[in-house]
Amino acid sequence: MSAFVTPDVPVLVHGITGRIGRRHTRNMLEYGTNIVAGVAAREDRVEGVPVFRSTAEAVRATGARAAVAIVPALSVLETIIDSIDAGLQLIVTVAEGVPVHDALRARQALRHSATRWIGASTPGLVFPGKSKLGFLPSVSIAPGDLGVMAKSGTLSYEVCHRLVRAGLGQSLWIGVGGDAVKGTRFADMLPYFATDPATRALVVLGEIGGNEEEELATALQATSFAKPVYALIAGSAAREGVTMGHAGALIHGNTGTVASKSAALQAAGAEVFTRIDDLVRAVAAGAGAFRPSQNPPVAA
Amino acid sequence: MMLLEHDAKELLSRLGLPIPRGILVTGAAQALAVPVPCVVKAQVPVGGRGLAGGISIARSAAERDAALHNILGMAIKGHTVNAVRIEQPVEFIAETYISFSVDAGAANIRVLMSAEGGVDIEDEARRAQLFSAAADPDLDSVCATVRDLASRLPAEIRAAVAGAGQALAQAFFHYEAVLLEINPLFICADGNWVVGDAKFVADDNAFERRADVRGQVEARPTLYPQMALKLNQGYDFVRLDPLGDIGLVTTGAGLSMQLVDELVKRGHSPFDFCDIRTGEFRGRPDRLIQVLRWIAEGPRIRAVLVNFFAGLTDLGEIAGLLLQALQAVPEIRVPVTARLIGNNLDEAVRVVGRAGNPIAIETDLERAIDMAIASMAAIAVEPGR
């Protein structure tokens, strides 16, 4: 897979003519995202952006390198394959409810490509103050030192909002999505955050189910990740066999519990919390050490 | 979502896979005609039923009726047993094990196999001894892996397990399963095999194109209440504690789950988990009314906490809908605290103010939690309710 995109990456929007597609496109343009094309069956222009009938055509005409797909869940697989065929570097799919077997097929197709998939079921990613691929809420975004990765959209809105109020913004905030089979997992983003000079600490918002947090812990140790890591694991009050919203958030037997995730991350040197306030306090307290001294945290 | 064993077996049987003859029973009267000996098995969506006393072999009618009496209504890992499957025992020469599961990290299919099945396979040390291999997520690759693993089994069961495994792999892909575990897979003296137990985790995201699996779930709304609700209403509502002291009206799966944690850590017991999806209200208070009605059924509810972190949703409109819903559900007599943040908050405050402030609005979640908890002090639980 190629290097991660930069904030100025030219973006195309799949499903740009839908009600939600239009709204997200308008908001992304206002934020400063370099949207160069749309792909849809009808119309020629949305919010001033030229619309093409196919991904390949849009890429040829505009040089788009990344895509945001605002298409129904059952169309996500086809859109990903189109994006691979058109040679895009990145595709973000926001739809919830992508079937697991479609996600498996997408991962198969991506394996031999240079395309990275972020999603499904994600509000997207933002380079604060620069560009946004998705619909992360402005009230939670500010430029800063923290690399943020989250499974849950709404939980990350809340945590980032509180961090921003405490004067702690983000270098890159990325939603990896709450599904079990997904394009980009926590550990996949480590090389980026390790080398990105703007990122001085990592905030990981995990939840019960699967083994993505354990996998991240292994990667932290294997790569001797040198920046401070703060993690919140949601779902400590959940019980086995009960799904709470996210398809991936389900405990089976002894795996996927808060205890197993916390133990693994702590062993890898992370500070792990189960309450939002505790995490925010710890990041604020740690900021004195990890950020440059001329830039102290602002009081809430 | 995990299917009940009975439904898993029915779906497998429909593709021609052999299962023991059996019926689903929800009341003792239905079982009177079932011949003995028979096996009575609790139908709950968790593993470890045998160890919990949820599976019983009955040699006489009296034993059958006693087993039914004991198992129906018992709780296994917090799930009440509302149905049992009663089936004919199988004569076998070996109890083997096979499973297919989606490995989310590797994005492939993990196949596990063993000549010896049994309950202790849940044990991690035991699991490590299973024959295991990963296959690409397509039927041909998985069948090749099944044949390869089966070749390491004892000669007298090899062919049967290989045959069963390939039929099961077909079912796994046909139904778009996330997990299909057969433990035990009975091998009979004549070389035939029978699905002894089936753990089937279905993908509800595929229901739109998998009418067969969806139909199995929809046929039993009382046994799959959570999924029935989701399929009917399009949102999530889970009763966590029928005697809970605080009702939650919240949106967003992750934040709602975290809010449950925060309340439990403060010593309270949320009545429900809820992801109401404010973005799908379409100007109607219906979802709010339904959720408030459910919460009103809680006999020990002393406060309602609303938490809407709205990205794009108009909070002015949401506040209006919330007021309409509260008017429609006068059974809610406890204080309502609403944590609202996002688009058009000022209008929400105005709308609620014009109505005489029946809801306390707060923008900070920690403060809203504190307010909701403080509001409980004024509410005594009515004795006998």
Image: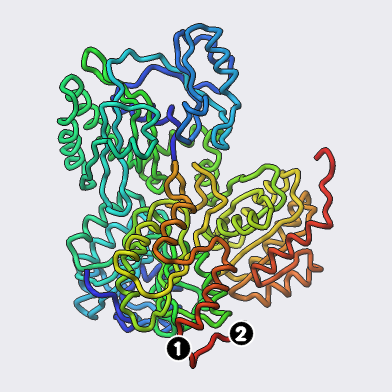
> Residue drawn 45% across and 70% down?
A203
> Residue drawn 30% across and 29% down?
B97
Q: Secondary structure at mark 2?
A: loop
Q: Position of residue B55 (x, y in %)?
A: 48, 22
Quadrant of the snapshot with the C terminus of chain A: bottom right
Q: Earlier in the sequence, mark 2 or mark 1?
A: 1
Q: Position of residue A172 (x, y in %)?
A: 40, 77
Q: How is the image coloured?
A: rainbow
Dot 2: chain letter: A
Residue that sits furthest to the bottom in the current view: A294
| Amino acid type at image mark 2 | Ala
| Front position among marks 2 and 1 | 1
Can you tell which quarter of the image residue A199 is in? bottom left
Q: Position of residue B382 (x, y in %)?
A: 84, 44
CB atoms of marks 2 and 1 within 8 Å = no
State the residue position of label 2.
A299
